[in-house]
Amino acid sequence: MNLDAVRQHFEQRAFDYDGLIPRLIPRYREQHDVILQLITSETNANIKVLDLGAGTGILSAVILSAFPQATVLAFDMAENMLKTCQTNLSAFRERLTLQQGNFAEDDFGSGYDLVVSGLAIHHLDSAGKQQLFHKLFHSMNPGGILLIRDIVTGATPRLTEQYEQLWRQYMKANGEDDAAWFQKYLEEDIPSSVEEQTKWLAEAGFADAGCHWRYLNFAIFGGVIPR
């Protein structure tokens, strides 16, 4: 899979991404609520957060609003996404750091209490995901929480096909060209099943690796660093 092609796609879509994404992803805003509920830190906790594939900063903004002492590193491969993120999150500029890079290859620091990733890791193949999970494990503090929101496959090929058909119906009902978006998905994305990814998280050392929320081919899953 050509990550440069993915980067170019997001460079082009950065300026209309926020309005577009809820038309493509079912229950998009509900997912933010679920992620917040899964963060067990006290509201006033001074937590260090990594947002992998931060995009325009939608999820970072949710966290920075809910946790007024939190600091966030917004990491993304697309320069235009980070420019939009900087504009969107200008109210949080003292608690926000931006970094452009490829999270599969580049260093994104350590000492994180919370790592979140929204609709990003599916750009990696199976080996890439496993390597990233090991990398994340060693970048987080004991007790740290990992929450991944991503597109996934079904437990069987038949379920995958069923979920994808329903997803296309959702996009079409929102006025989008479902055939064009689905073709781009086939060309650029490499989703894995929740079952595979929670297994890989456990193998990397995460405790309580599991799925917290799911709707069709979208899921929120993760794990915790043992204390």
Image (cartoon, rainbow, N blue to C red):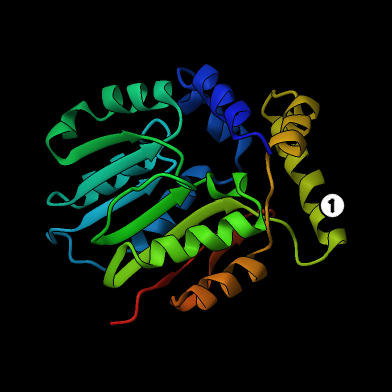
Above or below, 86 against 95 in this view is above
The quadrant in which the N terminus is found is: top right
**Closer to us: 78 or 25:** 78
Residue 6 falls left or right of residue 142: right
Residue at x 52% of width, y 71% of height:
201
List x then y, in percent, for residue 227.
Answer: 27, 82
Q: In terms of image quadrants, where is residue 39?
A: bottom left
At horizontal 61% and vertical 48% (from top left) the residue drawn is 124
- Along the line of sight, the residue nearer the viewer: 69 or 11: 11
Residue 219 visible? The answer is no
* Helix, strand or loop at mark 1: helix
Q: On the rendered structure, is 209 left or right of 57?
A: right
**Residue 71 appearing in the image:** yes
Rendered residue at 15%/41% (across/down): 95
Q: Quadrant of residue 48?
A: bottom left
Q: Amino acid at mark 1?
A: Glu
Please give the name of the residue rendered at 60% of the width and 40% of the height, measured from the top-left corner: 25
| 213 up-or-down from 7: above or below | below
Q: Position of residue 200 (x, y in %)?
A: 57, 71
Residue 77 position, x and y percent, is: 45, 33
- Judging by the rendered image, the residue that carries numbered circle 1 is 161
Total labels drawn: 1
Q: Which quadrant of the structure image shows residue 55?
A: top left
Residue 104 left/right relative to 24: left
Q: Is residue 130 above or below residue 84?
A: below
Q: Residues within 10 Å of mark 1 (few under 14, many from 20)?
A: some
Residue 67 place in picture, x, y as percent: 19, 52
Q: Nearer the viewer, residue 51 or 220?
A: 51
